[in-house]
Amino acid sequence: MKRRAFFFDRDGVVNVSPGSGYVLRWEDFHFSDGIIHALRWLKDQGFALIVVTSQQGVGKGLMSRQDLDDIHARMQTSLSGHGAAFDAIYACTCLASDPACTCRKPAAEMVLRAAAEHDLDLTRSWLIGDHDRDIQMAVNAGVPTTIRVSNGKPPCVPATFT
């Protein structure tokens, strides 16, 4: 049986949004309030946890792919200590202006790739994002339930969830 999943945008959901800039170093990465608890709870409920993030800072040359991978590795190490690590991280590093890009939100590619690689049931999955492009990516991928957060405040974890 395919697994249910929660897909998360990174900046503004998993971590505090850097505003108009980019998280270029681990020292600039700060988990959003309550997110570690929420991730642990969802993991305990059997959900796959997947990050789908656009990281244009790599495409702009503000950071390397290795820098991005280092931030994600440190994020995973920190979350692992709480039993809340992600099952996978998908990052589009293309520029918004790149006409050849197929992975940039609101394209469904990152979600569809995750579903194929992790045997996920998108019809029973959720996406949490902080922009219209996140929500549209879910719609484009066939993920029926979305949650949009604002001001870097993650949603509350319900007491019961089916």
Image (cartoon, rainbow, N blue to C red):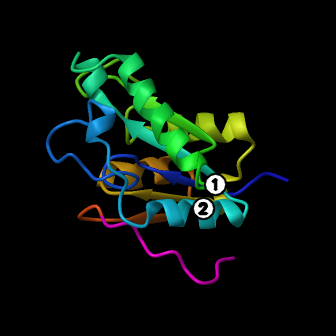
Figure check: 55 above or below 52: above
For the residue carrying disc 1, how many other residues have a C-alpha within 10 Å: few (<14), some (14-19), or many (20+)? some
Magenta highlight on residue 155: yes
For label 2, the crowd category at 10 Å Cα-Cα, with few meaning under 14, some 14 to 19 and many 20 or more, is some
What amino acid type is highlighted by mark number 2? Arg
Q: Tell which circle, 2 or 1, labels the residue nearer the N-terminal end.
A: 2
Residue 99 seen by the camera: yes
The image shows residue 114 at horizontal and vertical percentages of 62, 38
- For residue 71, which quarter of the picture? top left
Residue tagged by mark 2? 40
Residue situated in front as seen by the camera: 27 or 159: 27
- Residue that lies at the very extreme toward the right in this rendered image: 1
For image coordinates 52% across by 66% down, the residue present is: 37
Contact? badges 2 and 1 (CB < 8 Å): yes
**Image disc number at residue 83:** 1
Type of amino acid under label 1: Gly
Quote the CA–CA distance across marks 2 and 1: 6 Å
How many numbered circles does the render carry?
Answer: 2
